[in-house]
Image: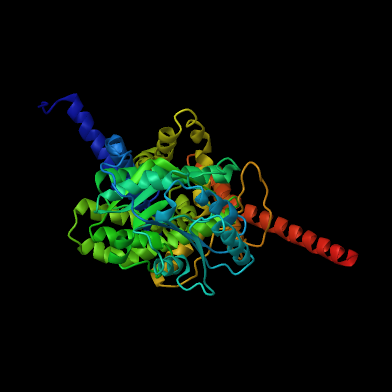
């Protein structure tokens, strides 16, 4: 115990008094007194940043949990079937002209007894994919492949409706699902089926990998974002015995589990997460196999990526609204409930970021006289919790997956954060629509079978128009550019990197979409001219 006259004690008391005065008595050291406007700006600004930092701290917890359990994840099933069960492979399609041939070709090569296999092509297409896929299936049927073609003339329930309708004629005890842009390995069924020898296992999910990861910076960023989910989140949740979700594809489900959980339901846009939580609340076990990867294709354009993220953000928020009350009432461990809340609600960060963005300029004006002391004690903890957690999360995921090349991720971090900024507007809309109960259709993400052999886009027919979105993004980017100029004027260089990150994110999203749509119009006009010339010649 220190004596009263100890210099260390005197220094400690003095520092504590200085902190109290700096943070609470007069934050502007006598130069400026906070008035009602200052408080009206600062309280919500730092309150929202605090909430956002909670999700950042959760990333650190995911990292800690991952490293604790990563070596305990299974690579082989504990028991095996003596007699293999029947499997139905479901391939849901909607206007997938460019990838359907590749998909069926790979499915036909799967290593599993033909007398125990059923392949269902569940096609809701409204374009030439319908006729093309039907002919393709007929040609494989002629070779003896147990494949069936089912076409719906409506899209009731979208993908969930197609999968549920397919169950009516499915003969398999187990159901494997693959989206149209996936290329499953030939041993996929044999490497997953034996985990179902445990009668409590309801789902086996595998890790996604990416055929066109290196197509451009955007696809590389998407791959890193998804790697964080499949490497850290899934491993941490599964390793600790928490709830995690089937990702809608590249996995296998027990039919009895689907039926016990209430079947595929289409009142959310993420029917996979919805079914996952309903099934786990019923007591079914989920298994995750990170060692088994299933290649897929990433969107190569910003707006296509945004449309995909809109669907996922809205769907996950819908699932939260639908199931969180039941999850919180359920007789499951508190840790499982907390993780479910963190898993299902992260997209509320997007509207929060919109509010923070709007407040940034008035807060910068309010804090004009604020010194380094307040910056350190208010800003630094929030930066560590938010921005540093993002960096650590994705860098560690890449280090685990690519131990030789992971350092490149450091150079991609600014682009990764800029892409996240570029999702703010569209995902804010997604969250509000979900919370307000506004229904919308299942908008597919266009895929074109792009790989090293086919590096270009063949058609623009599947791309949706962006409408007002890029103009709003450019306007917000310009707002942040004005803030960056103001920061330079008042010598607030501390905030400049963050402001420029927002400028680049919004400008990237807005201008890249407009440029791509302009190219699409030129390409379409060229195609029309060629068609006219060909018609004149004939």
The percent position of residue 265, horizontal first and vertical second, equals 38, 68
In terms of depth relative to the viewer, which is nearer, 97 or 172?
A: 172
Q: Quadrant of the N terminus?
A: top left
Q: Is residue 9 left or right of residue 20?
A: left
The reply to whether residue 43 is in sight is no
Q: Is residue 485 left or right of residue 355?
A: right
Across the whole image, how many numbered discs are drawn on residues?
Answer: 0
Up the image or down, 282 lies above or below 402; here it is below
The reply to whether residue 352 is in sight is yes
Q: Quadrant of the C terminus?
A: bottom right
Name the outermost residue toward the right: 537
The percent position of residue 181, horizontal first and vertical second, equals 54, 53
In terms of depth relative to the viewer, which is nearer, 351 or 255?
A: 255
Q: Residue at x 64, y 65 (%)?
A: 128
The percent position of residue 142, horizontal first and vertical second, equals 57, 58
Q: Residue at x 32, y 63 (%)?
A: 258
Residue 90 picture quarter: bottom left
Q: Residue at x 31, y 66 (%)?
A: 259
In terms of depth relative to the viewer, which is nearer, 286 or 129?
A: 129
In terms of depth relative to the viewer, which is nearer, 492 or 131?
A: 131
The percent position of residue 381, horizontal first and vertical second, equals 34, 41
Up the image or down, 383 lies above or below 139; here it is above
Q: Residue at x 57, y 46 (%)?
A: 218
């Amino acid at each position: 115990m220190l004596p009263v006259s100890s210099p260390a004690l005197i220094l400690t008391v003095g520092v504590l008094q200085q902190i109290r005065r700096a943070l609470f008595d007069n934050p502007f050291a006598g130069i400026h007194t906070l008035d009602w406007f200052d408080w009206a700006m600062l309280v919500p600004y730092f309150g929202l940043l605090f909430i956002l930092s909670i999700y950042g701290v959760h990333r650190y917890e995911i990292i800690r949990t991952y490293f604790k359990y990563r070596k305990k994840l299974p690579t082989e099933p504990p028991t095996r079937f003596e007699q293999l069960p029947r499997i139905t492979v479901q391939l849901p399609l909607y206007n997938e002209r460019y990838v359907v041939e590749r998909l069926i070709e790979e499915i036909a090569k799967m290593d599993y007894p033909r007398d125990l296999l059923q392949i269902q092509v569940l096609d809701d297409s409204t374009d030439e994919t319908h006729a093309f896929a039907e002919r393709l299936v007929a040609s494989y049927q002629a070779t003896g492949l147990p494949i069936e073609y089912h076409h719906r003339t409506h899209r009731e329930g979208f993908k969930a409706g197609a999968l549920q309708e397919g169950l009516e004629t499915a003969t398999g005890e187990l159901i494997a699902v693959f989206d149209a842009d996936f290329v499953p390995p030939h041993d996929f069924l044999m490497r997953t089926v034996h985990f179902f020898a445990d009668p409590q296992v309801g789902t086996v999910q595998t890790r996604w990998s990416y055929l066109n990861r290196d197509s451009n910076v955007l696809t590389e960023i998407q791959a890193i974002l998804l790697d964080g989910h499949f490497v850290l989140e899934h491993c941490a949740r599964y390793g600790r015995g928490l709830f995690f979700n089937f990702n809608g594809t590249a996995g296998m489900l027990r039919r009895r589990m689907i039926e016990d959980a209430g079947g595929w339901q289409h009142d959310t846009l993420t029917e996979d997460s919805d079914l996952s939580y309903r099934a786990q609340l019923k007591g079914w076990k989920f298994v995750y196999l990170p060692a088994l990867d299933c290649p897929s294709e990433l969107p190569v354009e910003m707006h296509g990526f945004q449309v995909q993220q809109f669907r996922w953000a809205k769907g996950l928020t819908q699932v939260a609204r639908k199931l969180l009350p039941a999850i919180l009432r359920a007789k499951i461990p508190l840790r499982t409930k907390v993780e479910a809340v963190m898993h299902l609600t992260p997209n509320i960060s997007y509207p929060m970021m919109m509010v923070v963005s709007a407040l940034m300029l008035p807060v910068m004006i309010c804090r004009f006289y604020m010194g380094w002391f307040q910056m350190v004690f208010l800003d630094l903890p929030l930066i560590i919790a938010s921005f540093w957690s993002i960096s650590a999360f994705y860098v560690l995921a890449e280090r685990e997956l690519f131990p030789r090349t992971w350092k490149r991720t450091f150079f991609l971090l600014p682009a990764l954060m800029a892409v996240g900024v570029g999702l703010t507007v569209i995902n804010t809309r997604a969250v509000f629509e979900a919370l307000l109960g506004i229904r919308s259709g299942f908008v597919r993400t266009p895929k074109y079978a792009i790989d090293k052999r086919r590096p270009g886009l063949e058609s623009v027919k599947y791309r949706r128009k962006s409408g007002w979105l890029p103009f709003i993004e450019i306007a917000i980017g310009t707002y942040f550019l004005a803030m960056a100029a103001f920061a330079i004027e008042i010598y607030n260089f501390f905030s400049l990197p963050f402001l420029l990150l927002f400028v680049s994110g919004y400008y990237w999203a807005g201008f890249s979409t407009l440029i791509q749509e302009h190219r699409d119009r030129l390409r379409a006009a060229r195609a029309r001219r060629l068609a006219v010339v060909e018609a004149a010649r004939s």
